[in-house]
Image (tube, coloured by chain):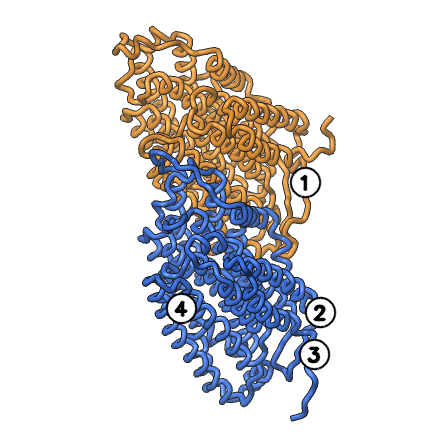
Chain colours: A orange, B blue
Amino acid sequence: MLEGWPLLSLLIWLPIIGGVGVLALGRADADRARWSALGVAALVFLLSLTLWIGFEVGVAGMQFVERVPWIQAFGIDYYLGVDGISMPLVVLTAFATLLVVVAAWEVVRYKPAQYLAAFLIMEGIMIGVFSALDAILFYVFFEAMLIPMFLIIGIWGGPNRIYATLKFFLYTFLGSVMMLVALIYLRTEAGSFAIQDFYGLQLPLATQMLIFLAFMAAFAVKVPMFPVHTWLPDAHVEAPTGGSVILAAITLKIGGYGFLRFSLPITPEASMALDWLLIGLSLIAVVYIGLVAMVQEDLKKLIAYSSIAHMGFVTLAFFLIFRILAGSGSRDGALMALEGGMVQMISHGFVSAAMFLCVGVLYDRMHTRRIADYGGVANRMPVFAGFFVLFAMANAGLPGTSGFVGEFMVILASFQAGFWYAAIAGLTLVLGAAYSLWMIKRVVYGEVKSEAVGELQDVSARERLLLGSLAAVVLFFGIYPAPLIDVMAPSLDALFRIVVPTL
Amino acid sequence: MNFEMPQFALAAPEIWLGVMVCVVLIADLFDRSQEGRIAFFLTQATLLVAIWLAISTHWGGDREITFNGMYVSDSLAAVLKVAIAGLAAVTLGYSRDYLRQRDLLKGEFYMLTLIATLGMFVMASASSLLVLYVGLELLSLSLYAMVAFDRDSRIGAEAAMKYFVLGALSSGMLLYGMSMIYGASGSLLIDDIAARAAAGDNLLLMAFGMTFALVGIAFKFGAAPFHMWIPDVYQGAPTAVTAFLGSAPKIAALALFLRLLADGLGQLHDQWQIMAIILAVGSLSVGNLFALVQTNFKRMLAYSTISHIGFLFLGLIAGTDEGYAAALFYAISYGIMAAGGFGMIILLSRKGFEAEMIDDMRGLNDRHSGYALVMLLLMFSMTGIPGTVGFYAKWLVLQALVDSGMVWLAVVAVVFAVIGAFYYLRVLKAVYFDRVESPAPLEAPMGPRVVVAANGGLVLLLGLFPDTLIAICRAAFGL
């Protein structure tokens, strides 16, 4: 049906143009803005599903490729395509945006048209990031993403929103301009801006190291890795619920995606030489940030720190491959680490989105995020409590939920790198369970602590739909992750061949 | 010396402008509205025709030299002139109601703008030191008068005085340098100077002359450490004048640099490169750091101009045609952004009220979301965020730097770009995040509203489809 359609272009530009349309339509009438935004988001999500259906499993290369000249003087093309690494992320983006639009329905009262338009434009830009195959095109989307996010946090955020959004912007901007210099340098070496032409350049190690560090500046801030993670808790706490969902579910993944698409294949030797740095920082994130999460008194901060810890797990998986190869020489083990990291990224997208939505549900009723203000929520909101506990379990990596699959694969693989790697990485399960469950105990269970909690109403049909759909996905991929892994395995295998050509 | 008949047709844009200056002056006398309405429309029409003339006479053809070697017609001249006349027309489009509200709306304003434009045209096509200088003075003298246009304003008079004294000083420097170059090469013609420099005659004297000339050029650009006049003049001049002053003359200053240093003294590139690096890094640091602490929007834009000039110089430093093309693209896109930035101040101002403080922008999104959107585009464009034209300007400059092996300068430049981001974001904070108690809706006349929408739209359009403008800028240097 959609044969020959520029599907990726549609996925990018439909939400952007739709966002502008929502802005124009909904200035006077908030309901019209909501319905039109819902229409656009649903349409984009359906289109992204056709992307998944039309995607040929078992093919490593790029699919749905579009290539037209864009800036001819420098040979820059409007060059799009997805492989098994990026396609699930595109679908995840479309799904998360749909959730955000629904979640904002009655909640956002200040300029709802602008709010929804910002998220739709953001959606288009993020899909652009995942499908751009030209470095400048990638950079354009990568940076343009800052504009809507800056506004979302700054306009609809909490009391300290201005500090948070400036910090967010300047941190990420500093990281990405370094990457721009690296990309420009790579073009002088490769003669083109196509990302695939950057692979296999055989640059000297010293040059590779500098390029690697420039990439790291951009992606480590986005992930975010210790010690440049400090913008994330601030941004999350001050962001509106939708902003938190998009931040956690998608923008953090762009950092991980960047490591896979740029750092590892373009500078493989430097990645190997500097893997101690990445592994070290990742392990610090897993353990130290996990402990930090435990002592948080603010619900959103706790989830934000848990996101950092989980993403640390992802970067750990990506850069552990060299140790696994050195330790056991097992190609399959290393590949499993990459797959585990990717599965973890996707799963964290769903789980963290769900957690932030749950906090949003509570916040809309109580207007506080302090854990101490809650207690005994289950008595008044039994359905909600069920969902919340399920997602907290998924966050802790309980078997049967999607959170388990990725973590298990990575820990299994890391045993081949050495016992201690696995032991420290395994701590994430312990710590994750500790902070998630302790939070659940204090918020959900126990006696009803205050009058405000006593007057809570259980989730509405809209919220039930939101949380229910997420719960279905989390359980589905927890029980049957094969479709996800089948899609990404060939592309990760091809990536692996580029990173370690000798095997 | 045998006399050859000059090819007048090649100088059609200048001749047209010169004639129309007189026509506007006379027509204004017969204008009964006393508001210079005839002069305004006549001036705008003149500028549009000048654009057409510049394209049809200069663009695409071979490089031709006439008037005994003093006038050059090439594609570069076409691009420069189109940009100059276009920016002049845009800034005039903003100015009308602003001037009327302040009782400044007189036909002379338009005539002075036309004379300044004529001066810039002459500079763009100059192929002799004297012609270059005459064009520059034609521009400068008109600008001095325009800055002082509100003669009852003390701050305006002070600004004009400062501008005049420092401008005269810099013109003197430039002239002194030119005289040394003339002494070293024995010719006023740029081509002869280039040939002498290539032959290696009197290089030391020429380098001396070049140094003074570069100082003069840096003054006109407003590059640190010769930037002192910029903030005071920008703040003191009527905003309608600042908009003009901040946009088109930067392109003329680029013309001065390209004709004199790139065409004439390209051989001395090694010498002027070091100086240009100092000017560039100095401007980047002074402009960005001082802009951080400004509370006055006009002053902030003035310091931001200095930082943008620093970035523009980075393109020139490379000394390659790619670098010059990048600088040209930068100058044009900066002109568009600056015109828009000052145009926003004009739009927000009312009779007896200058919206020149950053605080005056507060709650703009509540008052008029369209203007807020234009402001967003302009500020992000100045920051260099993709989706706006400012990104490609910065990227082309960085590309030229990296291609010629100066990666470290590119890193310095991007670090300052990040520092610069902070003050642009501060403006957006006022526009979007600060809320005012009772947002008063904004009423602005139709004309400026259309211009500001077009201006913002252009920033976005060139940000999505920069290909054509990049190709044009490169074609101007035969790339």
Report which quarter residue B411 is drawn in: bottom left
Check disc 3 and report its element: helix, strand or loop: loop
Q: Which is more foreground, mark 2 or mark 1?
A: 2
**Which amino acid, mark 3?**
Gln
Residue at 50% across / 29% down in the picture?
A113
Chain that bears disc 1? A
Q: Which residue is mark 2?
A: B61
Where in the figure is residue B432, as x and y percent of width and height? 41, 38
Residue at mark 2 to residue at mark 1: CA–CA distance: 37 Å
Where in the figure is residue B303, as x and y percent of width and height? 38, 58
Q: Which is more foreground, mark 3 or mark 2?
A: 3
Q: Which residue is mark 3?
A: B7
Chain that bears disc 2? B
Q: Are marks 3 and 4 in contact (CB under 8 Å)?
A: no
Check disc 2 and report its element: helix, strand or loop: loop
Pick whichever of labels 4 and 2 is earlier in the sequence.
2
**Which amino acid, mark 4?**
Ile
Chain that bears disc 3? B
Residue at mark 3 to residue at mark 4: CA–CA distance: 41 Å
Residue at mark 4 to residue at mark 2: CA–CA distance: 37 Å
A495, above or below A307, in the image: below
Res B217 visible = yes
Residue at 65% across / 93% down in the picture?
B1
**Which amino acid, mark 1?**
Glu
A208, above or below B139, in the image: above
Front in this rendered view, residue B294 or A461: B294
**Which amino acid, mark 2?**
Gly
Q: Which residue is mark 4?
A: B278
Q: Which residue is mark 1?
A: A66
